[in-house]
Every structure is written in structure tokens, then in C-alpha cells.
Image (cartoon, helix red, strand yellow):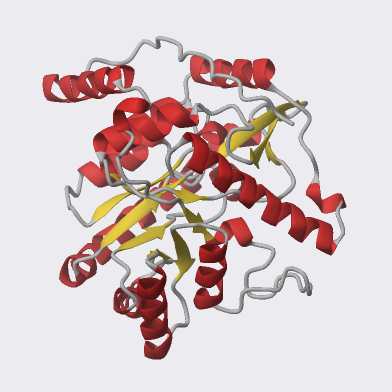
Amino acid sequence: MITNKPMQQPIDFDHPRLPRREFLKKASLGALALSVSPIDAIPTKKEKMGIVIHAYGKRWQQQLNNEKFPPFRNAIDFLVHCHSIGAGGVQISVSGWDGEMAKKLRKTSEELDMFVEGSIGIPRKEGDLEKFKKEIQDGKAAGIKVFRTVSLGPRRYEALRSKEEFEEFLNNAHQALDWVVPILEKEKVKLAIENHKDWRTEELLTALRSRDSEVLGVTLDFGNSIALMEDPMETLEALAPYTYSTHIKDMAVEESPEGFLMSEVPLGQGILDLPKMVAVCRAHKPNMRFNLEMITRDPLLIPCLTPEFWATMPTVKAQEMAAVLRMVKVNQSSLPKVSELDTEGLLAAEENNIIQSLAYASKNLNL
């Protein structure tokens, strides 16, 4: 079991001078984060944590078949199961739905008193806009008001091999946001872009601030930023004011000759200061929803000691990399490989990791 160790304090880097308004904004956010304690931000009513469909990647749409752990055929199966284990809602893919599915999902969620958030693909070309619009409308019919999306999909350091490829990604991502804003504004729903090992914090903030639209915000993942050489607490403090949805998780790390390995672990068993992170989120938005993304899989390699990793991240400071590698060294533990399990063992591990996380959140995070 991995002990819950505090993250290393962030190094005081030499930041470039900021315009006065931006400086004051950053300073006020930092003061807020330092002043918030977990107790300060606990709501009087417990808001149960939701579950992201990726936490059940092995059971979703019959990826693995097992009598003891039957697969989820659709969003309603997933919703009903999550209710049975004590979750308060779900974040589910909106794709291939018809009007009947949307109506049934809305009816079931209302009967179970659960929230539903959507997960939707961003248009890659202008011809994808009709599909995007339909999925927004289908989700809205199901009662969904917030849709999570990712701009790239695969991990930046694996999919992109040059500065030019990264610049092309940025241009395409900005174009896609320009395309979808009018649709979102017309439908009166919000699109929450995840920090999904693609955008670094300032890059994502630039995309949001340059449009200054209430329909665009963030799906704040608590652990992804480590892979891009960022302190997860600093990322959270910067993105929390723009956040419409969350992927709450805990992380464990281990050194590797090519960089380091990183794994999701049950809440409370990793290196993240979850009570403080939840408190900072609630200080900005007291009614913020938290969705568990405990993905049961083998550790991910973050190859930050290879030249290829840096092809798309020329602006990362040496101090940032050093801080992350020091954090890994201080907090490392041996990470399990679940691919060694048989089908039932893997499904049991997936379920157990989620149950443990729900229990921790209920006891320690008022979720």
C-alpha cells in the first residue's frame, strides 16, 4: 500500500513580469489557496462524488465479459450501478444516442436523484460540427448541462514529435473552439476542456481567456499535470476559477531509467493532498461537482529523460523538471501491474479500487 505523503513545496521560480491586473489576479489566487483549510470549504450538505466512465474501462460496453462483474451495455446500466455503490452521479460518453435513450436516462437520473455530465468529442474538421451539435442536443435532452472534452486525445509527448506538429495541434484546437462556441451559446450549455496531458496550464488558460466566454471552462484533472512537468497543486490553483467539472484522483509514482512511472491509486493512498485540493476547489465554487477517475491499469511511463519528450515542450524550465523528479524520488513506491491478473481478478481490482475511493471520499472529503 502506498502511504499518503505530502507533495514537495513548489520552488520559487523566476517568473517574467506580469501586467498589473494579471499580477493582482495571480496574487489573490495564491493568497486564497494559502488561507483555505479543508474545514473552511466543507459544505453543510454532503454532495456525493460522481464516477467517470473511464474508471470502469474494463466493464464499459463489454470490453471484458464476466458473470460476477457484468458489462455495462449503455449509460443507464452504468448509472444504475453507480447508484448501487453509493455514487452521486456519472460522467458518461454522449455518442450514438437517440431520443429514447436521452429520455430514459433523464427519467432514471431524476428517479435516483443523481447528476449526469456528458463526455463529448471536439470537432476535428468543420464537417464534424453537425455531429457535435446533435450530441450536444441529445445530452441536453438527457438533462446534461456540462460536457467534458479533450483537445488532443492521445498524450502530447506520444502523439506529437516536433514543434511544428505541436503548433498545428494548437491551431486546430483553437479553430475547433471558435467553431463550437456559437453552438454552445445557442444551446445554453457548458464545454469543459480537460487538462489531458495535452495542454499545459498557461496554454489552456490562454485558450479560455482569449475567448472570454462563459460557455467554455475546464474539466480539472487532479493528476494529469505531473506528466507535463507541473506541480498539481499549482495547476489546480490556476484552473479552479475556470472549472466546470473535475476528475478527482490520487497518484503514485516510481523512478524509471527513462523518466518515471505514474499510476492512479485509490483515493488517500497516493501523494496528492486531496483535502486541500478539494478545499481550494470549493473555495472558488462551493457547489463544484467531483467525479472519480480511478483508472485501473498498468503504470504509465513519462519519458522525460528522453529527447523525444521535449520536442513539443521547449518552454518548460529546468527548475520545473527538477521539482517533479525530486518529488518522484522522495515519494516513489513499487507500482503494481494489473495486466498480470486474469479477467475476474482485473475486474475485481477495478471494482475494489472504486469502492475504496468512495469510502475515503465519504469519510475524509465530505463527498
In the rendered image, the quadrant that contains the N terminus is top right
Q: Please, which residue is most extreme toward the left here?
A: 21
Residue sitting at 46 percent across and 62 percent down? 90
How far from the left and from the top, in percent, is residue 132? 35, 74
Answer with left or right where residue 144 lies relative to residue 105: left
- Please determine whether, in this image, residue 120 is positioned above or below residue 142: above
Q: Which residue is drawn at 33% across and 72% down?
A: 126
The picture places residue 97, in percent across and down from the top left corner, at 44, 83
Q: Picture coordinates of residue 204 (x, y %)? A: 35, 42
Placement of 193 over or under 15, stated as above or below: below
Judged left or right of residue 241, residue 315 is right
Question: Nearest the camera: 218 or 357?
Answer: 357
- For the residue pair 203 and 287, the one nearer the viewer reads as 287
- What residue lies at 40% left-to-right and 90% top-to-bottom? 100
Q: In which quarter of the image is residue 195?
A: top left
Q: Where is residue 17 in the image (x, y as percent from the top left)?
A: 23, 15
- Please say if 108 is above or below 235: below
Residue 315 in sight here: no
Asked if one can make out residue 98 in the rendered structure from this viewpoint, the answer is yes
